[in-house]
Structures are given as structure tokens and as C-alpha cells.
Image (cartoon, rainbow, N blue to C red):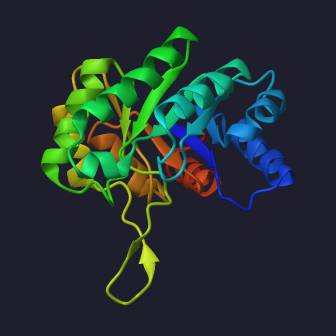
Amino acid sequence: MIDHSILHPTMTDEDLRRECEVARKYRVASVCVKPYAVKQAVELLRNSEVQVGCVIGFPAGNSAIAVKVFEAENACKEGAVEIDMVINIGKALQGDWDYIREEIRSVTDACHGLGAVVKVIFETDYISRESDIIRLCEICTEVGADYVKTSSGFGFVKQSNGDYNYLGATIPVLELMKRTVGPQVKVKAAGGVRNLDQLLQVQEVGCTRCGATATGAILEEAMLRFGKY
């Protein structure tokens, strides 16, 4: 169920090697890496069952459609089999649904043509209106995206105390997404899932994937609670 995220801006090649070993050790579904790291992650995870995924337009979603398509195609050609794309947040907030449809369709068609799964990141700390989330779910269903996803983990919002933070995946938003997408579209929780209880909660509401950085802690807790997996 876990996509092990290796996305912090400061991560080095040594960090990538270490985190790919974490993914291999716990036999997670995939790693989610930055575009330049795809080829290296594929090599590091050779002879394992862990898939390699890549983020596109990450984290702010501001790249032009053609750039997102190129970035996705390049990642697929280098070995990524899962693509997590960030939508153009400003276009969604202004209700430019024709643009959003074209963007998601273009990336989805390109990735499906190369045999890759597409997960569409809404960034629900910014896209917070229910009506907008519903419209995005409808568009993802219409164009054939494989997953809808809450967050990048970097959608920081200024809080009342002046700090910047994010909520990420919340149960009400996940329930709304699950209700609204078509039967062929899955839901991925990302952002803020840091322990086993939170992982089980998002699974309970219908998520089949979850982005996580605390993978080792979550699965060690699972083994203590449930026995060897």
C-alpha cells in the first residue's frame, strides 16, 4: 500500500541509496522519486518487487502542459512505471476546467501510451472547496487517470501563528474523493500519514495507496502489532 517518498529538496544520491534500501527491505509498492533520480532508482531496485514512480511538475504544478508531458515521457523512458503529477493549482482555483482537463488528459494519455500509471495530485491544502475537489474527481474519471491523490507533502499554508504547515490527507477529503471518482479510479492519501493508525484509517475509507516517508516506523509498528508480514 505504501509509496515510499524520496522527495525532499536536500536529498543527495547517498540519501537515495539509503531510502531505496528501506523500500527494498519492507517490500513497499513503490518509491516516489524526483525526475533526475529515476534511472538511478531503477538500478538500485533491480531484482526487487518495488516499482519506481516519479513526480511531475513537482511540487507547485506550474510547468506548462507540454513540459509536464515531456517530463512524464522522459521519466517513463528511464524506467518509471508510475507518474504522480501536480495539477496547475491556480488554474483550478480560478475554475479553468478546460485547461485542467487538457493538462490531465495530455499527461495521462502520454503515460498510458508508455505503460505507466498516473496519479493526479490535487494539493488539497490549496484546493479546499468541496465543489472544486468534486470537479477534479469528475475530470480525472472522464480522462481515465488511475488515481486521485491529496497532496505533494509540500503544500505549505501560512498558519495563524505565522508558521507554515499543511494538513495533507484528511479523512473528510478522502471520503469525498472516494465518493466522487468513478469505479475505475483509485484514491491515494499523501501528506501527514506518519504512523500505523493513520495508515489504517486511510485504508478504512478506501485508499489503496499512501505516500509516506516514515515507512520504516510504520511497518515496524505493524509487525509488533500484527506479527511478521
Going 59% across and 54% down the picture, which residue do you hit? 213
Single out the residue that lies furthest toward the right: 14
Say whether residue 56 is left or right of residue 174: right
Quarter of the image for residue 4 reads top right
Evaluate whether residue 201 shows in this view. no
Q: Nearer the viewer, residue 29 or 118?
A: 118
Evaluate whether residue 81 shows in this view. yes
Say whether residue 135 is left or right of residue 161: left
Residue 14 in percent (x, y) is at 86, 52
Single out the residue that lies furthest toward the left: 131
Say whether residue 60 is left or right of residue 174: right
Q: Nearer the viewer, residue 195 or 154?
A: 154
Going 28% across and 54% down the picture, which residue do you hit? 127
Residue 124 in percent (x, y) is at 32, 54
Going 61% across and 47% down the picture, which residue do you hit? 5
Quarter of the image for residue 168 reads bottom left
Q: Compared to 113, does 222 lie above or below? A: below
Quarter of the image for residue 221 reads bottom right
Say whether residue 164 is left or right of residue 216: left
Which quarter of the rendering shows the C terminus?
top right
Residue 46 in percent (x, y) is at 81, 24
Residue 33 in percent (x, y) is at 66, 42
Q: Nearer the viewer, residue 94 or 28?
A: 94
Going 53% across and 9% down the picture, which residue do you hit? 113
Callout count: 0
Q: Compared to 69, does 159 lie above or below? A: below
